[in-house]
Image: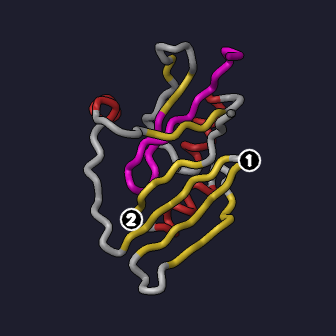
Amino acid sequence: MEFYIHHVCISVSDIEKSTQFYRYFGFKEVADYTAEDGSFRIKHLKLGDFIIELFWFSDHTPAVRKDLWDDLKTGGYRHIAFKVEDIHKTLEKLKKDKVADTKTQVSIGRTGILYFFIRDPDGNFVEIVQDNRNL
């Protein structure tokens, strides 16, 4: 039996704003469902074989997002990561397009990869990595 990554689910406060954010990274909308009573909505955004499933609820409760280190100490899923070939060019473009803060910098992780973090429209952490380890 083999397992493959299929999707990650993110609850969002504004499904259209989040859809636009993830489109920036190349995701395409492949499914959209709205409950008959309008109480919730689901969108699937796909990149390659991977899907981000966005959930929106009319009674959405916003989460308080901490700084990265405190967020990592909290139980549960913490972030999604996108791999790139050239992290420095990517960061430069993200800053130019105002997706990344001008103070964002590339760091070297304890596992040997280059990385930086940005936030999606709801404050969820999104990691950008350059991983040349050939694992």
Reply yes or no: does residue 131 show up in magenta.
Answer: yes
Q: Where, by quadrant of the figure, is residue 68 drawn? A: top left
Is residue 104 shown above or below 49? above
Q: Residue at x 68, y 65 (%)?
A: 30
Regarding residue 101, the answer to whether it shows in the image is: no
Residue at the right extreme, as displayed: 48
Q: Residue at x 48, y 79 (%)?
A: 35
The residue wearing badge 2 is: 13
Q: What amino acid is found at the position of numbered circle 1 in the picture?
A: Gly
Question: On the rendered image, what quadrant is the N terminus found in?
Answer: top right
Q: CA distance from mark 1 to mark 2?
A: 25 Å
Secondary structure beneath label 1: loop
Q: Is residue 93 left or right of residue 103?
A: right
Is residue 111 shown above or below 16? above
In front here: 8 or 62?
8
- Looking at the picture, how far across and down is residue 92, in whole percent? 60, 37
Secondary structure beneath label 2: loop
Is residue 66 shown above or below 30? above
Tag 1: Cα neighbours inside 10 Å, few (<14), some, or many (≥20)? few
Tag 2: Cα neighbours inside 10 Å, few (<14), some, or many (≥20)? many
Q: Is residue 124 left or right of residue 96?
A: left
Is residue 32 shown above or below 114? below
Q: Where, by quadrant of the figure, is residue 61 drawn? A: bottom left
The residue wearing badge 1 is: 48
Q: Nearer the viewer, mark 1 or mark 2?
A: 1
Q: What amino acid is found at the position of numbered circle 2 in the picture?
A: Ser
Q: Which residues are magenta?
A: 117-135
